[in-house]
DNA sequence: TAGATTGTTAATCGATTAACAATC
DNA sequence: TAGATTGTTAATCGATTAACAATC
């Protein structure tokens, strides 16, 4: 389901065509913290608090935000709810986006049951597995495990923009091939496999161990 | 168990005391790709191939590496196995590091069963849960679910450097408090909760949805 | 040799930071 | 008002890139 263009409020007449990679990445991180702060009932947040949670310098945060308008109130901070909406507009991700999940094992079920995607407007509309014994099984009320053969149909009918791979590493490339064949151009890879895809497809690989190594380096030195 | 200082080969006389955040982060990412390439039996890799997998510019990669020595062979590329060892030395993470995992639910079990940490020298030495029905249950051969009361003892005896939180979001702060009380200073948070910790403790929050939003921005524009 | 790829330079661009006036 | 925090400037630092000689 798609409702066409999301209503675009005029954020700022001088906003650039396309954000730089750095700005887009940081705005996404602010959004995560703000979304959670909103849930916790926090009404305002200062750039310093945002800095504590995101590890981004507070001046940098104020600078990033002031590039799009005056969202803050001096002496008070930013209104959490309103800032969430502004950043979503800037990132042009105000709408709902449909994603398909591959793998109904422990990781797949954990993802399906998590609010981590739903919080950001991602709806898991299909769950696939190759294991015949899992097909038809119900996971988290709304989802039924489907055979991978249904993929082309689902991509067509449900406007899937992202495929999330949560299968064993050995099976990841096969799923990626199916996704590419089905026309999906963003793949989120939860396995450690290196996926071979055509240049127009973007692969994001979750790498908690890499993050840990990074954290550890600063701990050890 | 700890074997003291890892054997430090002399990487380069002029190597700086401490890597910049950017360099350390990129080296960690190279390591992930190299580790996997090694597993797949690949013997050499070019800076261009590394660039394709890490989304880091190939010149940047050559520059990062050449700062520590001449690891490549012109016309050929880098020896995968040797480069892995060199980067591990640079990051001073050649040894084994013990981590404790909290939450024996679907996500916790998925993490415990994954090679994603083991590949990078992280050993999960303890698995905790608060659910009395899960205590004593065996997960993946080597691990038995323990009560959270054992935490102080485990931290002391097993030299835990990182605590990984994979419990429901509502329970995350409680676990974080226990970890802080136990003296653990690196926390890896798989929940969407914002954790309150003292300044000397580092929290890394896994945020797949943020990564997706970021990818999506470039897809939509 | 011919082709490929590293190591390195030089030039540019964006990120980062401290500082502080403006103002809620 | 007094205190707090934004918005913005100016100066610095590191990241990024193209280009190419060196060399395997």
Image (cartoon, coloured by chain):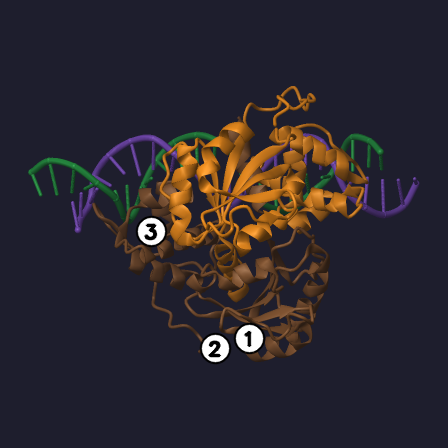
Chain colours: A brown, B orange, C purple, D green
Q: Which chain carries label 3?
A: A
Question: Is label 3 in a helix, a strand or a loop?
Answer: helix
10 Å crowding of disc 3: few (<14), some (14-19), many (20+): few
Reading the image, the residue beneath label 2 is: A2
Image position, residue B213 (x, y; %): 49, 59
Question: Is label 2 in a helix, a strand or a loop?
Answer: loop
Reading the image, the residue beneath label 3 is: A66
Image position, residue D20 (x, y; %): 73, 39
10 Å crowding of disc 2: few (<14), some (14-19), many (20+): few
In the figure, A138 relative to B17: above or below?
below
Q: Tell which circle, 1 or 2, labels the residue nearer the N-terminal end.
A: 2
Reading the image, the residue beneath label 1 is: A159
Q: Residues under labels 1 and 2: Cα distance?
A: 8 Å
Q: Do the residues labelled 1 and 2 touch (CB within 8 Å)?
A: yes
Disc nearest the viewer among 1 and 3: 1
Q: Residues under labels 2 and 3: Cα distance?
A: 31 Å
């Amino acid at each position: 389901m798609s409702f066409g263009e999301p209503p675009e409020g005029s954020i700022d007449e001088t906003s650039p065509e396309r954000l730089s990679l750095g700005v887009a990445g940081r705005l996404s991180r602010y959004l995560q913290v703000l979304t959670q702060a909103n849930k916790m009932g926090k009404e305002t947040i200062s750039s310093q608090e945002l800095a504590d949670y995101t590890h981004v310098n507070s001046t940098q945060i104020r600078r990033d935000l002031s590039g799009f308008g005056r969202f803050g109130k001096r002496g008070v901070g930013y209104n959490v709810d309103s800032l969430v909406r502004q950043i979503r507009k800037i990132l042009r991700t105000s709408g709902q986006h449909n994603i398909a999940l591959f793998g109904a094992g422990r990781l797949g079920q954990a993802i399906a049951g998590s609010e981590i995607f739903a919080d950001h407007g991602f709806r898991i509309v299909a769950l696939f597995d190759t294991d015949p014994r899992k097909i038809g099984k119900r996971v988290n009320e709304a989802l039924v495990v489907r055979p991978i053969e249904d993929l082309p149909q689902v991509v067509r009918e449900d406007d899937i923009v992202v495929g999330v791979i949560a299968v064993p590493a050995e099976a990841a490339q096969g799923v990626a091939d199916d996704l590419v064949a089905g026309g999906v151009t963003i793949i989120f890879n939860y396995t450690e496999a290196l996926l071979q895809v055509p240049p127009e497809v973007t692969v994001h690989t979750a790498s908690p161990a890499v993050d840990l190594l990074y954290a550890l380096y600063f701990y050890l030195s």
